[in-house]
Amino acid sequence: MTTEEALTQIFKDNFVAYFRSHAAHVNVTGRNFASDHKLLQKTYEDLQGQIDVIAEILRTLREYMPCDISEVIADSNLPTDAIEGDALELIDLVMVDLEYLVDEHRELITIAESEGHDEVANYAQDRVLALEKHIWMHRVTLE
């Protein structure tokens, strides 16, 4: 897999993770609604912000951002069915998506470094840190 291919896959998975976390944010209910709603908002806003960043990195690599939404959804490695459940289930489902993104970014670091794309590897390292912080917040909320 090339840097461009790995980054394109991350774009697709990040897009689906963004949608799923946004749906969880809007649909969460329960006694801790306010704090759960805010936690999920921080997550979806972070993922939403990466859509443009990843697309622009792809353009610097002379690739195009995926532009067929059905392809983005079909090619995502994340579940694309309804994200449903109580607050704890929603937070956990979003956390699992974040953990998957961390693994993909770690793989991107290795690929990008091997191809001499240090700037992409640095970006992926920064994303691992940001995603791990979200995972930590989700994990301690579930404890």
Image (cartoon, rainbow, N blue to C red):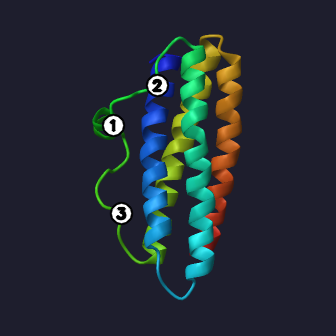
Question: SS for tag 1?
Answer: helix
Residue type at mark 2?
Met
Q: Which residue is mark 1?
A: 69
**Is 4 left or right of 122, judged from the image as shown?**
left
**Residue 73 horizontal side relative to residue 105, left or right:** left
Residue 23 in the image, given as x and y percentages of width and height:
43, 62
Say which of 138 and 55 sits in front: 55
Q: Earlier in the sequence, mark 2 or mark 3?
A: 2
The residue pinned by badge 2 equals 65
In what element is the residue under mark 2? Answer: loop
Q: Amino acid at mark 3?
A: Ile
Q: Quadrant of residue 40?
A: bottom right
Q: Position of residue 12 (x, y in %)?
A: 42, 36
Taking the spot 45% from the left edge, 21% from the top edge, the residue there is 5
Cα separation, mark 1 vs mark 3, equals: 18 Å
Q: Nearer the viewer, residue 50 or 129?
A: 50
Label 2 vs label 3, nearer the camera? 2
Give the tally of numbered discs. 3
